[in-house]
Image: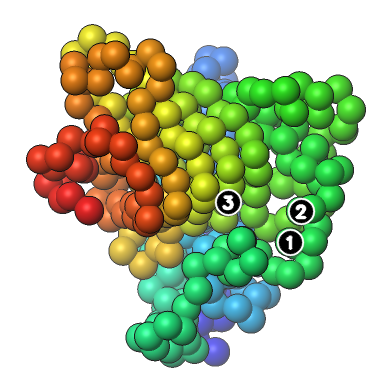
Amino acid sequence: MFRDQSLLVTMNQAIEAHQMISNMDLSSFDNKAKLAWTDCLELYEDTVDHLNRSLSSRNPIDSQTWLSAAIANQQTCKNGFIDFNLAYHLESLPFMVMSNLSKLLTNSLAINKATVSSSYNTNKVGGRRLLADGFPRWVSAGDRRLLQSSRVQRQLILWCLRRRLYCQGHDIREYSRTAETPSGGPPVGLRFLCLLQLQLQGLPRHLYVYSQRQFYRNCDIYGTIDFIFGDAVVVLQNCNIYVRKPMSNQKNTVTAQARTDPNENTGIVIHNSRVTAASDLGPLRGSFKTYLGRPWQKYSRTLFMKSNLDGLIDQQVGYHGVGILL
């Protein structure tokens, strides 16, 4: 099958890139550069895993999610150096192999999308459901039952804490004293991150919905600029989104979605939620503009469904930088 051949070639290139990055001479790297290099090494290891999962999966929609995550990893590797003002170290990376891998990932994503289109009738009216029993349709019945376990929820919360999502609240403090934190990805073999009834507090760029599948329900989320951002397939349902007071001369943007390829199946969906001013912004809401989001990357997409905007969003535009009001 042509799709499998394409994925196999791409995976072999990813393995080669990972090996070359692993064998790099780091003698000229300072501590920050070594941190960025370590992130790159882990990201390329994750990319190999994503491609292996895509190759072994018979579900093209699952494969599309993993391939989309693999594409996000490439840019994140580069951003690690750029964010530390160490862009000149990018010249030390195996540029040709990495560039070829990026092209192969793009091609594999397009080929796999064609498989999705031929396998599923996406034009069938009423044939697709966003939710099943209160969960996104990609959460299986077995996983839904698993998520009802208090032990699993404790592990998920600690996994969240260790990754600096800065979750706050009575439940989290209690769980952090009683549960063990698993290593690696989401606990007990879940292929997604699912968090229920949490309070997430921060300011700019706070809740990083990085990649793959994520689901948040009945959560309180606070922030200012781009405080829900990333390139995951993410649903936020029944959430209270509180916009806080930004610094002087700043604007609030609730979301910043990071889709870089038109064939990615990623996006932010906010369903049956409320966007309102936090207590520090409430008396000053007329002094600062607030937008539903801005396009972080070329093919960004965010959807608000059946949500209450509480008169907070700028009525002239809605989205900053795109001129669209939904």
Q: Label 2 amino acid?
A: Leu
- The foreground one among 271 and 224 is 271
Q: Position of residue 66 (x, y in %)?
A: 55, 62
Q: Residue at x 60, y 69 (%)?
A: 132
Q: Could you give the CA–CA distance between mark 3 and mark 1, rounded to whole angstroms?
A: 12 Å
Q: Residue at x 47, y 78 (%)?
A: 128
Left or right of residue 325, residue 120 in this image: right
Q: Name the residue tied to disc 1.
A: 144
Give the crowd class for mark 2: few <14, some 14-19, many >=20 residues within 10 Å: some
Classify the position of the N terminus by image quarter: bottom right
Q: Label 1 amino acid?
A: Arg
Q: Position of residue 286 (x, y in %)?
A: 19, 20
Q: Name the residue tied to disc 3.
A: 215
Q: Could you give the CA–CA distance between mark 2 and mark 3, rounded to whole angstroms?
A: 12 Å
Q: Name the residue tied to disc 2.
A: 147
Asked if residue 82 shows in the view, the reply is no
- The foreground one among 43 and 290 is 290
Q: Earlier in the sequence, mark 2 or mark 3?
A: 2
Q: Could you give the CA–CA distance between mark 1 and mark 2, rounded to whole angstroms?
A: 5 Å
Q: Secondary structure at mark 1?
A: helix
